[in-house]
Amino acid sequence: MNKRYESAKKIFAGYGVDTEAAIEKLKNVPVALHCWQGDDVTGFDHDGPLTGGIQTTGNYPGKARNPKELMADIEKVIALCPGKIKLNVHACYAIFKKGEYVDRDKIEPKHFKKWVDLAKKYNTGIDFNPTFFSHPKVNDGLTLTSPVEETRKFWIEHGKACIRIANYFAKETGFPCVINIWIGDGYKDIPADRVGPRMRYMDSLNQILSEPYDRNMVKPCVESKVFGIGVEAYTAGSAEFTLSYAATHEGVMPLMDNGHYHPTEVVSDKIPALMCFYPEFALHITRPIRWDSDHVVLLDDETKEMAKEIVRSGGLDRIYMALDYFDASINRIAAWTTGFRSWQKALLIALCTPHKALKALQDAGQRTELLVRQEEVKMLPFGDIWNEYCERCGVAAGPEWFDEVKEYEKTVLSKRV
Ligand code: RNT
Ligand code: ZN
């Protein structure tokens, strides 16, 4: 019996918090791990640069160069993280046998069989993302909003192909597949027409989603964005556009990425707003510094605040959570692991916070006491619960996991030259 845990458990019980229930709950909450941290969002279907208003910076050695390496790296991360990891794959991570290459409008489930095998090995599901960037058919930065019908058609066909693959993922794994549509379409400078591209985007989405799929198991969502590099003046898929699209199209969810808003807006406050209207929605959890920089997720204030909102609004069973960041300047396994563990910590803290008592103070108008109590709660021994949680999940609670990363870097990553 772990003495520190037992004593912490009593302290939390005094606040009306059941740490056993918190640990058991967190063990089974799926969080999607993005495959694209491992190779700087490159994928396997092209050699060109990353485009579409997003960027990775850094050239830390050891980046995964092929499916085998990327999957080995993901397995390493899984071994170092507590909790329930779901895979999250982009369409550009299609795996082609020699001579089997097809363009993105023609990809098929068979090109993703190895991802299914990996998911099955861990008894987990796969989320999916069509890739509307880093491709020669992105025409002047436009895909689903392009005024060139041939271009738009190509990307609609890509979207439909991805729906079929999402359906395959759900069917094969037995877990729902969230399929997230994000396009970087927009304009660098003041557009002469802001409605046209959005009407074309709406029509493209309608066409993509007319592809048949299992509505209980495939969960389409649309991700908004305020701006990107090179598209500073106008983004077709803005917050208002995607929220309205989801609100008016049955079965479509909005996806909020916390790097995609003006710097003083917080997703922690948007989560409870959406809870009032959407039965289900999705999140990309990232860490923006000054812009959508996609730094590694840390246990910082806004991360904790988002987790709190999810937990106390009853969102754990209604919100699909995915990590989305890519730092190429540090060891990528450590980047992945740090972000996943940080989000686990944030969720665990949220699950062990005495929300009921605090809410009662708010509703009773006891604002002074609420302020005082909220500050006191911050010093509760969350670390002891975390240690116990990690132990029960069979992973290191402290920084020892990094020794394994260093060893892996020495024996595996450093050989990738
Ligand atoms: C880009 C969006 C999008 C991508 C991934 C790779 O700003 O956040 O989700 O990060 O699709
Ligand atoms: Zn995102």
Image (cartoon, grey):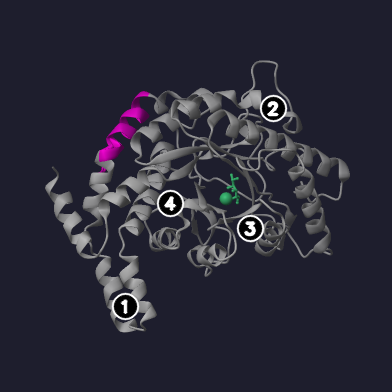
Range shown magenta: 392-411
Gap in angstroms between the C-alphas marked 1 and 4? 27 Å
| Residue in view at x 65 percent, y 23 percent | 110
Q: Secondary structure at mark 2?
A: loop
**Circle 4/circle 2 CB separation < 8 Å:** no
Amino acid type for the residue under numbered disc 1: Leu
Gap in angstroms between the C-alphas marked 1 and 3? 34 Å
The x, y position of residue 237, in whole percent, is 70, 57
Amino acid type for the residue under numbered disc 3: Lys
Gap in angstroms between the C-alphas marked 1 and 2? 55 Å
> Which quarter shows the N terminus?
top left
| Residue in view at x 24 percent, y 40 percent | 391
Residue neighbourhood size for the residue with mark 3, other residues' Cα within 10 Å, grouped as few (<14), some (14–19), many (≥20):
many
Q: Secondary structure at mark 1?
A: helix
Label located before the other in sequence (1 or 2): 2
Q: Is mark 3 within 8 Å of ligand 1?
A: yes
* Position above or below: 360 against 283: below
Label located before the other in sequence (4 or 2): 2
Mark 2 vs mark 3: give the one in front. 2
Tell whether 3 sits left or right of 413.
left
Residue where numbered disc 3 is placed:
225
Circle number at residue 297: 4
Label located before the other in sequence (2 or 3): 2
Residue neighbourhood size for the residue with mark 2, other residues' Cα within 10 Å, grouped as few (<14), some (14–19), many (≥20):
some
